Structures are given as C-alpha cells and as structure tokens.
Amino acid sequence: MRIFIQQLIFGIQLGSLYALIALGYTMVYGVLSLINFAHGDVYMVGAYIGFYACTYWLPFQRLSADPHATVMNIILAVVVLLLSMLLCGVLGVVIERFAYRPLRNGLGITDAHFWGFAIALPVAFHFHLFHRLSDGAGRFLFGIMWFLLIGMIVGYALRPVIRWISLRTVLSPSRLNALITAIGVSLLLENGGWLVFGPNPEFIGTMVPEKNFKILGGVIINSSQLAILVISLLLMLILRHIVLYTRTGKAMRAISHDIDAAKMMGINTDQVISVTFAIGGALAGAGGMMVGVLTHVQITPLFGLLPGIKAFVAAVIGGPGNIPGAVLGGIIMGVAEAFVGGSSFSTYRDAIAFTILIIILLVRPAGLLGRNVTEKV
Amino acid sequence: MRILMLRVIAILVTFIGLYMLSQFVTYQMDPYYFQVLIECGVYIILAVSLNLINGITGQFSIGHAGFFAVGAYVGAAWTMIWQPMVVERYSFLQMGTLHGDILNLLIALILGMTSAGMAGFVVGLPSLRLRGDYLAIATLGFAEVIYVLLLNINSVGGARGLNGIPTLISSGNLALFWVFLFVIISIVLSRNIMQSVRGLTWLSVREDEIAADAMGVDTTKVKVTAFVIGSALAGAAGVLYAHFLTGISPDIFSMNTSILITTMVVLGGSGSVTGSVIAAIVLIVLPEVLRFLKNDRMVIYSVLLIVMMLTRPQGIFGTKEIGFPKWRRKQPKTEGRSA
C-alpha cells in the first residue's frame, strides 16, 4: 500500500508535467486542428534555458547553511521559471509566424524577412558566429547581432523571390501538409539544438534546497515534487482564467468553434492564434524548466521528443481541443507510466502510453471528454 | 491474345534486363554508392506502398515503419531462427548455394509479407472507426508499440538487434535484382490499381467517403484491402533490407523512419506514384549529398523540408504522373473534387 501511494504521487507529478505540455498541444489543436509536433522541442528549449540560466546567467549561490543564500536561490529559481516561460512563449510565436501562418494564409512579402533569418541561421553557424552559450553571454550576443544583420540583408534580397513564388503557389490546406511542416519545424529545433547546445547531455545540479516530508504511513513526498504540483496547478488555474474570463480567451473559444465565423465577427484570428502559441509555449517552457531544475534529468537536444509524443497522446486521450481533457489525460498517462515503471514490466514503460491511446481511440474515438461530432452530409 | 503475349514479353524483358543490370552494377559500382542505391530502392517500395494507403485511398496512416519492422524481423527470424530448426529434416533448405539462398529468400519474403499484411489488417480495422488525425495517431502508436516490443523481445536480440543475418539477396550478385523487382512490382501494382475500375472505388473513398458509401462502394473492404496490400509491400521491403544489411536493430524502425516515409509521400505529391518515387530518391540522396556540410546538414535538410511545404504544398508532382502510358483507357480524372 505504501509503495502504491508512493508510485501514485510520482505518477501525479509526472502527469502534471505531461499535462502542462499537453495543454499546449490541445490549445493549438483546438484553434487550428494542427498537431504541433514541434511542441515537445519547445519543452526541450525550456529545459536548456533553465540550464543556462542556472549555470551561467544568474548568480546562484552554493547551497550552504546560510539561510539568506537559500532564500536568494529560491527567488532566482522563480526568475528562471519566468524567463524560461517568456523565451519559450516567444519561440512559440516565432514558430507560428515562421512556418504555420504562411502555410495557412500563403506566403506574403513579410515572410521574406523570416526566411532571411532562416537562411542566416545556418550561415551564421557555418562561420561560427555563435559560440557556445557557455563561452559567455557577450560573445553570444555579438553572434546574434551578426545573425540579425545577415538575416535582414538576405530578407530584403528575398522579397522579389518570395513575390515570384507566392504568385505561383496554389494553396491546398491539407492536414498532411500541416503535419509535415510541423515535423520539419521539430527537426529544425532538434538539429538546431545539436548545434547551439552541443550534443553532450547537460545536467543541472541542486539549485533549490530539497527536503523530504514524511506523511501518513511512511509515504515520502519530496519538496520538488510538491513544487512541481503546486506550480503546475497554479499555471493551469491561470490558464483557466484566461480562457474562460478574458476577451482573448473568448476569441480563442470562438475560433475553435468556427474560425470563419469568428473572422466575420471581427476577431483578428492571426493575433489570437499567436497568443495561443505564446501561451502553449510558455506552459511547455515552464514544464521543461521544472524538469531540468527540480528533477535533475539529463538534458539532450532530443529529450523533448518522447515527452512531447506522450503529452500529445495525453491530449488525444482527453479529447483534442479540450482543456480539462488534456489535464485528465496527462494525469492518466503519468500514473499509468509510474505504475508500469514500478512493476516488473518496467521496460514496457513507453509502450503503455500508446496501448492506452489505441484502446481509448477505439472505445471513444473523440477522447474521454471530447464531444462526438456527427458528420452532416 | 496479343496483349497476353506483350505482357509475357514485357515481364521477360524486365527480368532479363534487371538481371543484367544487377550483374553489371555490382561489378562496376563503388560499394558506398551501391548501398545508397539499394537504400533508395527499399525506400521507394516503402513510399509507393504508403502512397497506396495514404495518397490513393486517403487513409491518414503515418506508422509505416511498423510494417517495415514486422517484415524485416519475421524475415530475419526465418533465416536466423526457424530455418536452422527445420533444415535438418528438410535438407533442400540448406543455405550456401544459389538455389538454396533463393529458396530461403522466397520463404522469408512470403512469411514477412504475410505477417506484415496481417498486421496491416489489424491496423486497418480501426480505420473503420477513426478518421483523419485520429487514425494518424493510432497508426503512429501502433508503430511505436511494435518498436517497444522489439526492444523487449530477447529472442530477436532486444535492443542489440539481430546480427549476422546471411546476405541472401546478395548471393549471385542479385541484390539489385531483388530490390528493384519489388520496386517495379509496387509501381505496376499502384498504376494498375489507379487505372482500373477497382481503383476508381479507392479514389472515391479518398475524395468523399460518405458519397462513395452512398453510391454502393464497399468502403470497409476498400480501406482494409489498401492497408493489407500496402503493409505487405512494406513487409517485403523489410525482408529485403534485413537480408541486405545483415544486421537489424529496433532503431532502424523507430518513429523517425515512419516520419521519413510519410514525408516522402507528401513531398512527392500525395496520390502520385511518380512523386513518391522521386521524393524517396531525393530524401535518401539529399542527406548523403549534404554530407560535406557536416553538422549543418540536418538543419539545412529540415529548412528545405519546410520551404518545400510552403512553396509547393501539393508536393513535387501534385497528382500528376509521368510515364504511365494510357494506351487503352483514359486515366481516371482526380482533379474536379466534389464539394
């Protein structure tokens, strides 16, 4: 029984992380019907931001008996969390602007500038303009300046090319296209991650003091686990507030209901979609940062892949586009994984997600909390 | 009668031509290029067979590496595990001679294709209930379950994989022959399906399933058939690949492979067999060509993928075909989509 509860707590902790990522998937699916494969990689970037902020950017102090340092470190950790959420939100918006919006609306002249930056990125890497972030922020910023300059020049040069292409492109908004584009973005982030962050696995040491609390019956709950639970719950409540009680949230719900009707009602759909990506990215960034800083897993450029897929499965289990569903799915996924991982079938941990997925899809194709939409002819 | 004669002659010419080409190429070609060539062939089979499911029947399947894996592992299991068990009683199964190798390869192919086809049947069944993205996720999940199972089954080596598989397809310098025989089979099969009345029903399921159902098309049968044929061909590709590489491990059949095959179909133009072939060649050769860029190559590869999708969303070929002669019948028009 004690082990059961222990695994349950671990499962809920894992599940709340999956739920945070799944929320991003489900919101994007809700407004765009797009499986944003790159979302797991945003989570990876969040973890790396946590790593660099903890190791190089912020003055974390060595943990010692000094209570002042402990308080400082906790405040800094909150700053890291906010920073990671901010940067990942920006990343989400950039991804949307760079890849999904042209796919939706067709290439426009302004896209030339984004493509300019896309071309400038490999060029900058080729000439080693970016040094490793660990070489110091100054050199990195210098590299960024060069990158921006090259990107702007190439962007202006690209304008006539893009105009020529856009006149000859036939828009055919197919699901498969969107999926492949998302996969392309995901590959870009992963392989870009190899270049920017380096292939070696990174590891964040203990930045925040950890304590074990004994609760009833000898069950141990860790302060990091508690922090993960509380922070994710808080973020989910904030999200709930945004979606239910703000104008933007109302617009989001309108778009997910019917995007064309929402446009006709004067909603700036592109802007609201950007906000959706920003929120999704911020949640994933928070998840990544918490995994890196609080659970001390190894961070590699590919480490977002599997959690991303599992979170996505969680979103599907709950019903894509359904926000409480994503949370429920995430918790189910985490608990199932913790129990399988704790049993003698622990090597089948990664298969359980998909087994649950296939069973649930067969029994309730629209997910646990999703509505079954009957198709009208 | 004349048409039958023509067909017999065409088949004979294909066989002899492939045999001669295979002998010639094996002696003349650098082993590295040869390996790339064989890999191209294997991926053409995979892309064309996925195109049957994805492009022609419109079922959104993105877990093709699962079938590939089933074929490869069952084929390899025959040559590595089951054949040694029965060879003592049936000595004609002995490997080492050309006849024995071909016989064993054929048995492996039959077993691999059958089991992959059965897997396709099992996956095809949910397609009766699931549509669009949901089916895509279920197929991807299936492929991932196969991957984890392979990692955990110790009799086929687990994560280490099966090593030391005899290179059956290379015996008698026939590697190119076998692989491109199946390439031709899959292309001709797709072409014949698309140009036949039966194929029209497949296309109708892609265009509008409800309308097809209302017109009396047995959509269930069409979808399951497409899955079975497509996955059996993927299984054949798996058998050939396993007996070419001599060592297989679950990593070859991970999700990245599924995604790569799907990308080939979409990049070439979903529904276009020519497109699938060209895209398969491009996507296999491109990373090799970009090798001089060292670390940057995968970044450039992914940017090129996004650029392709944005500038030509319908794929390289759209739904057009090259080199499908229309001697007798006009190709079914797929352009005017029903509302």
Image: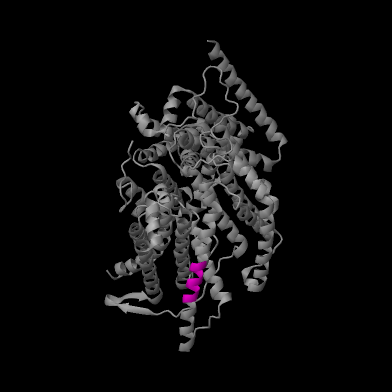
Image location of residue A68, percent across then percent down: 47, 88
Residue B261 lies, with reference to residue A83, above or below; the image says above
> Is B55 on the left-hand or right-hand side of A120?
left
| Residue A241 appears in view | yes
Residue B11 lies, with reference to residue A301, above or below; the image says above
> Is B25 on the left-hand or right-hand side of A375?
right
Image location of residue A337, percent across then percent down: 37, 60
On the image, which quarter does residue A48 sit in?
bottom right
Q: Residue at x 60, y 53 (%)?
A: A110
- The number of callouts visible is 0
**What color scheme is it?**
one colour
| Residue A136 appears in view | no
Image location of residue B310, percent across then percent down: 57, 46
Image location of residue A44, percent across then percent down: 51, 63
Q: Residue at x 70, y 63 (%)?
A: A128
On the image, which quarter does residue B18 sit in?
top right
Q: Main secondary structure of the magenta part?
A: helix
Residue A136 lies, with reference to residue B76, above or below; the image says below
- Give B174 or A369, whichever is nearer the viewer: A369
- Give B50 or A78, whichever is nearer the viewer: A78
What quarter of the picture does the N terminus of chain A occupy?
Answer: bottom left
Residue B86: within the magenta? no
What quarter of the picture does the C terminus of chain A occupy?
Answer: top left
- Give A305 or B239, whichever is nearer the viewer: A305
Q: Given the current orientation, which residue lies at the most extreme top position?
A: B1
Q: Which residues are the magenta region?
A: A78-86
Q: Residue at x 60, y 28 (%)?
A: B322
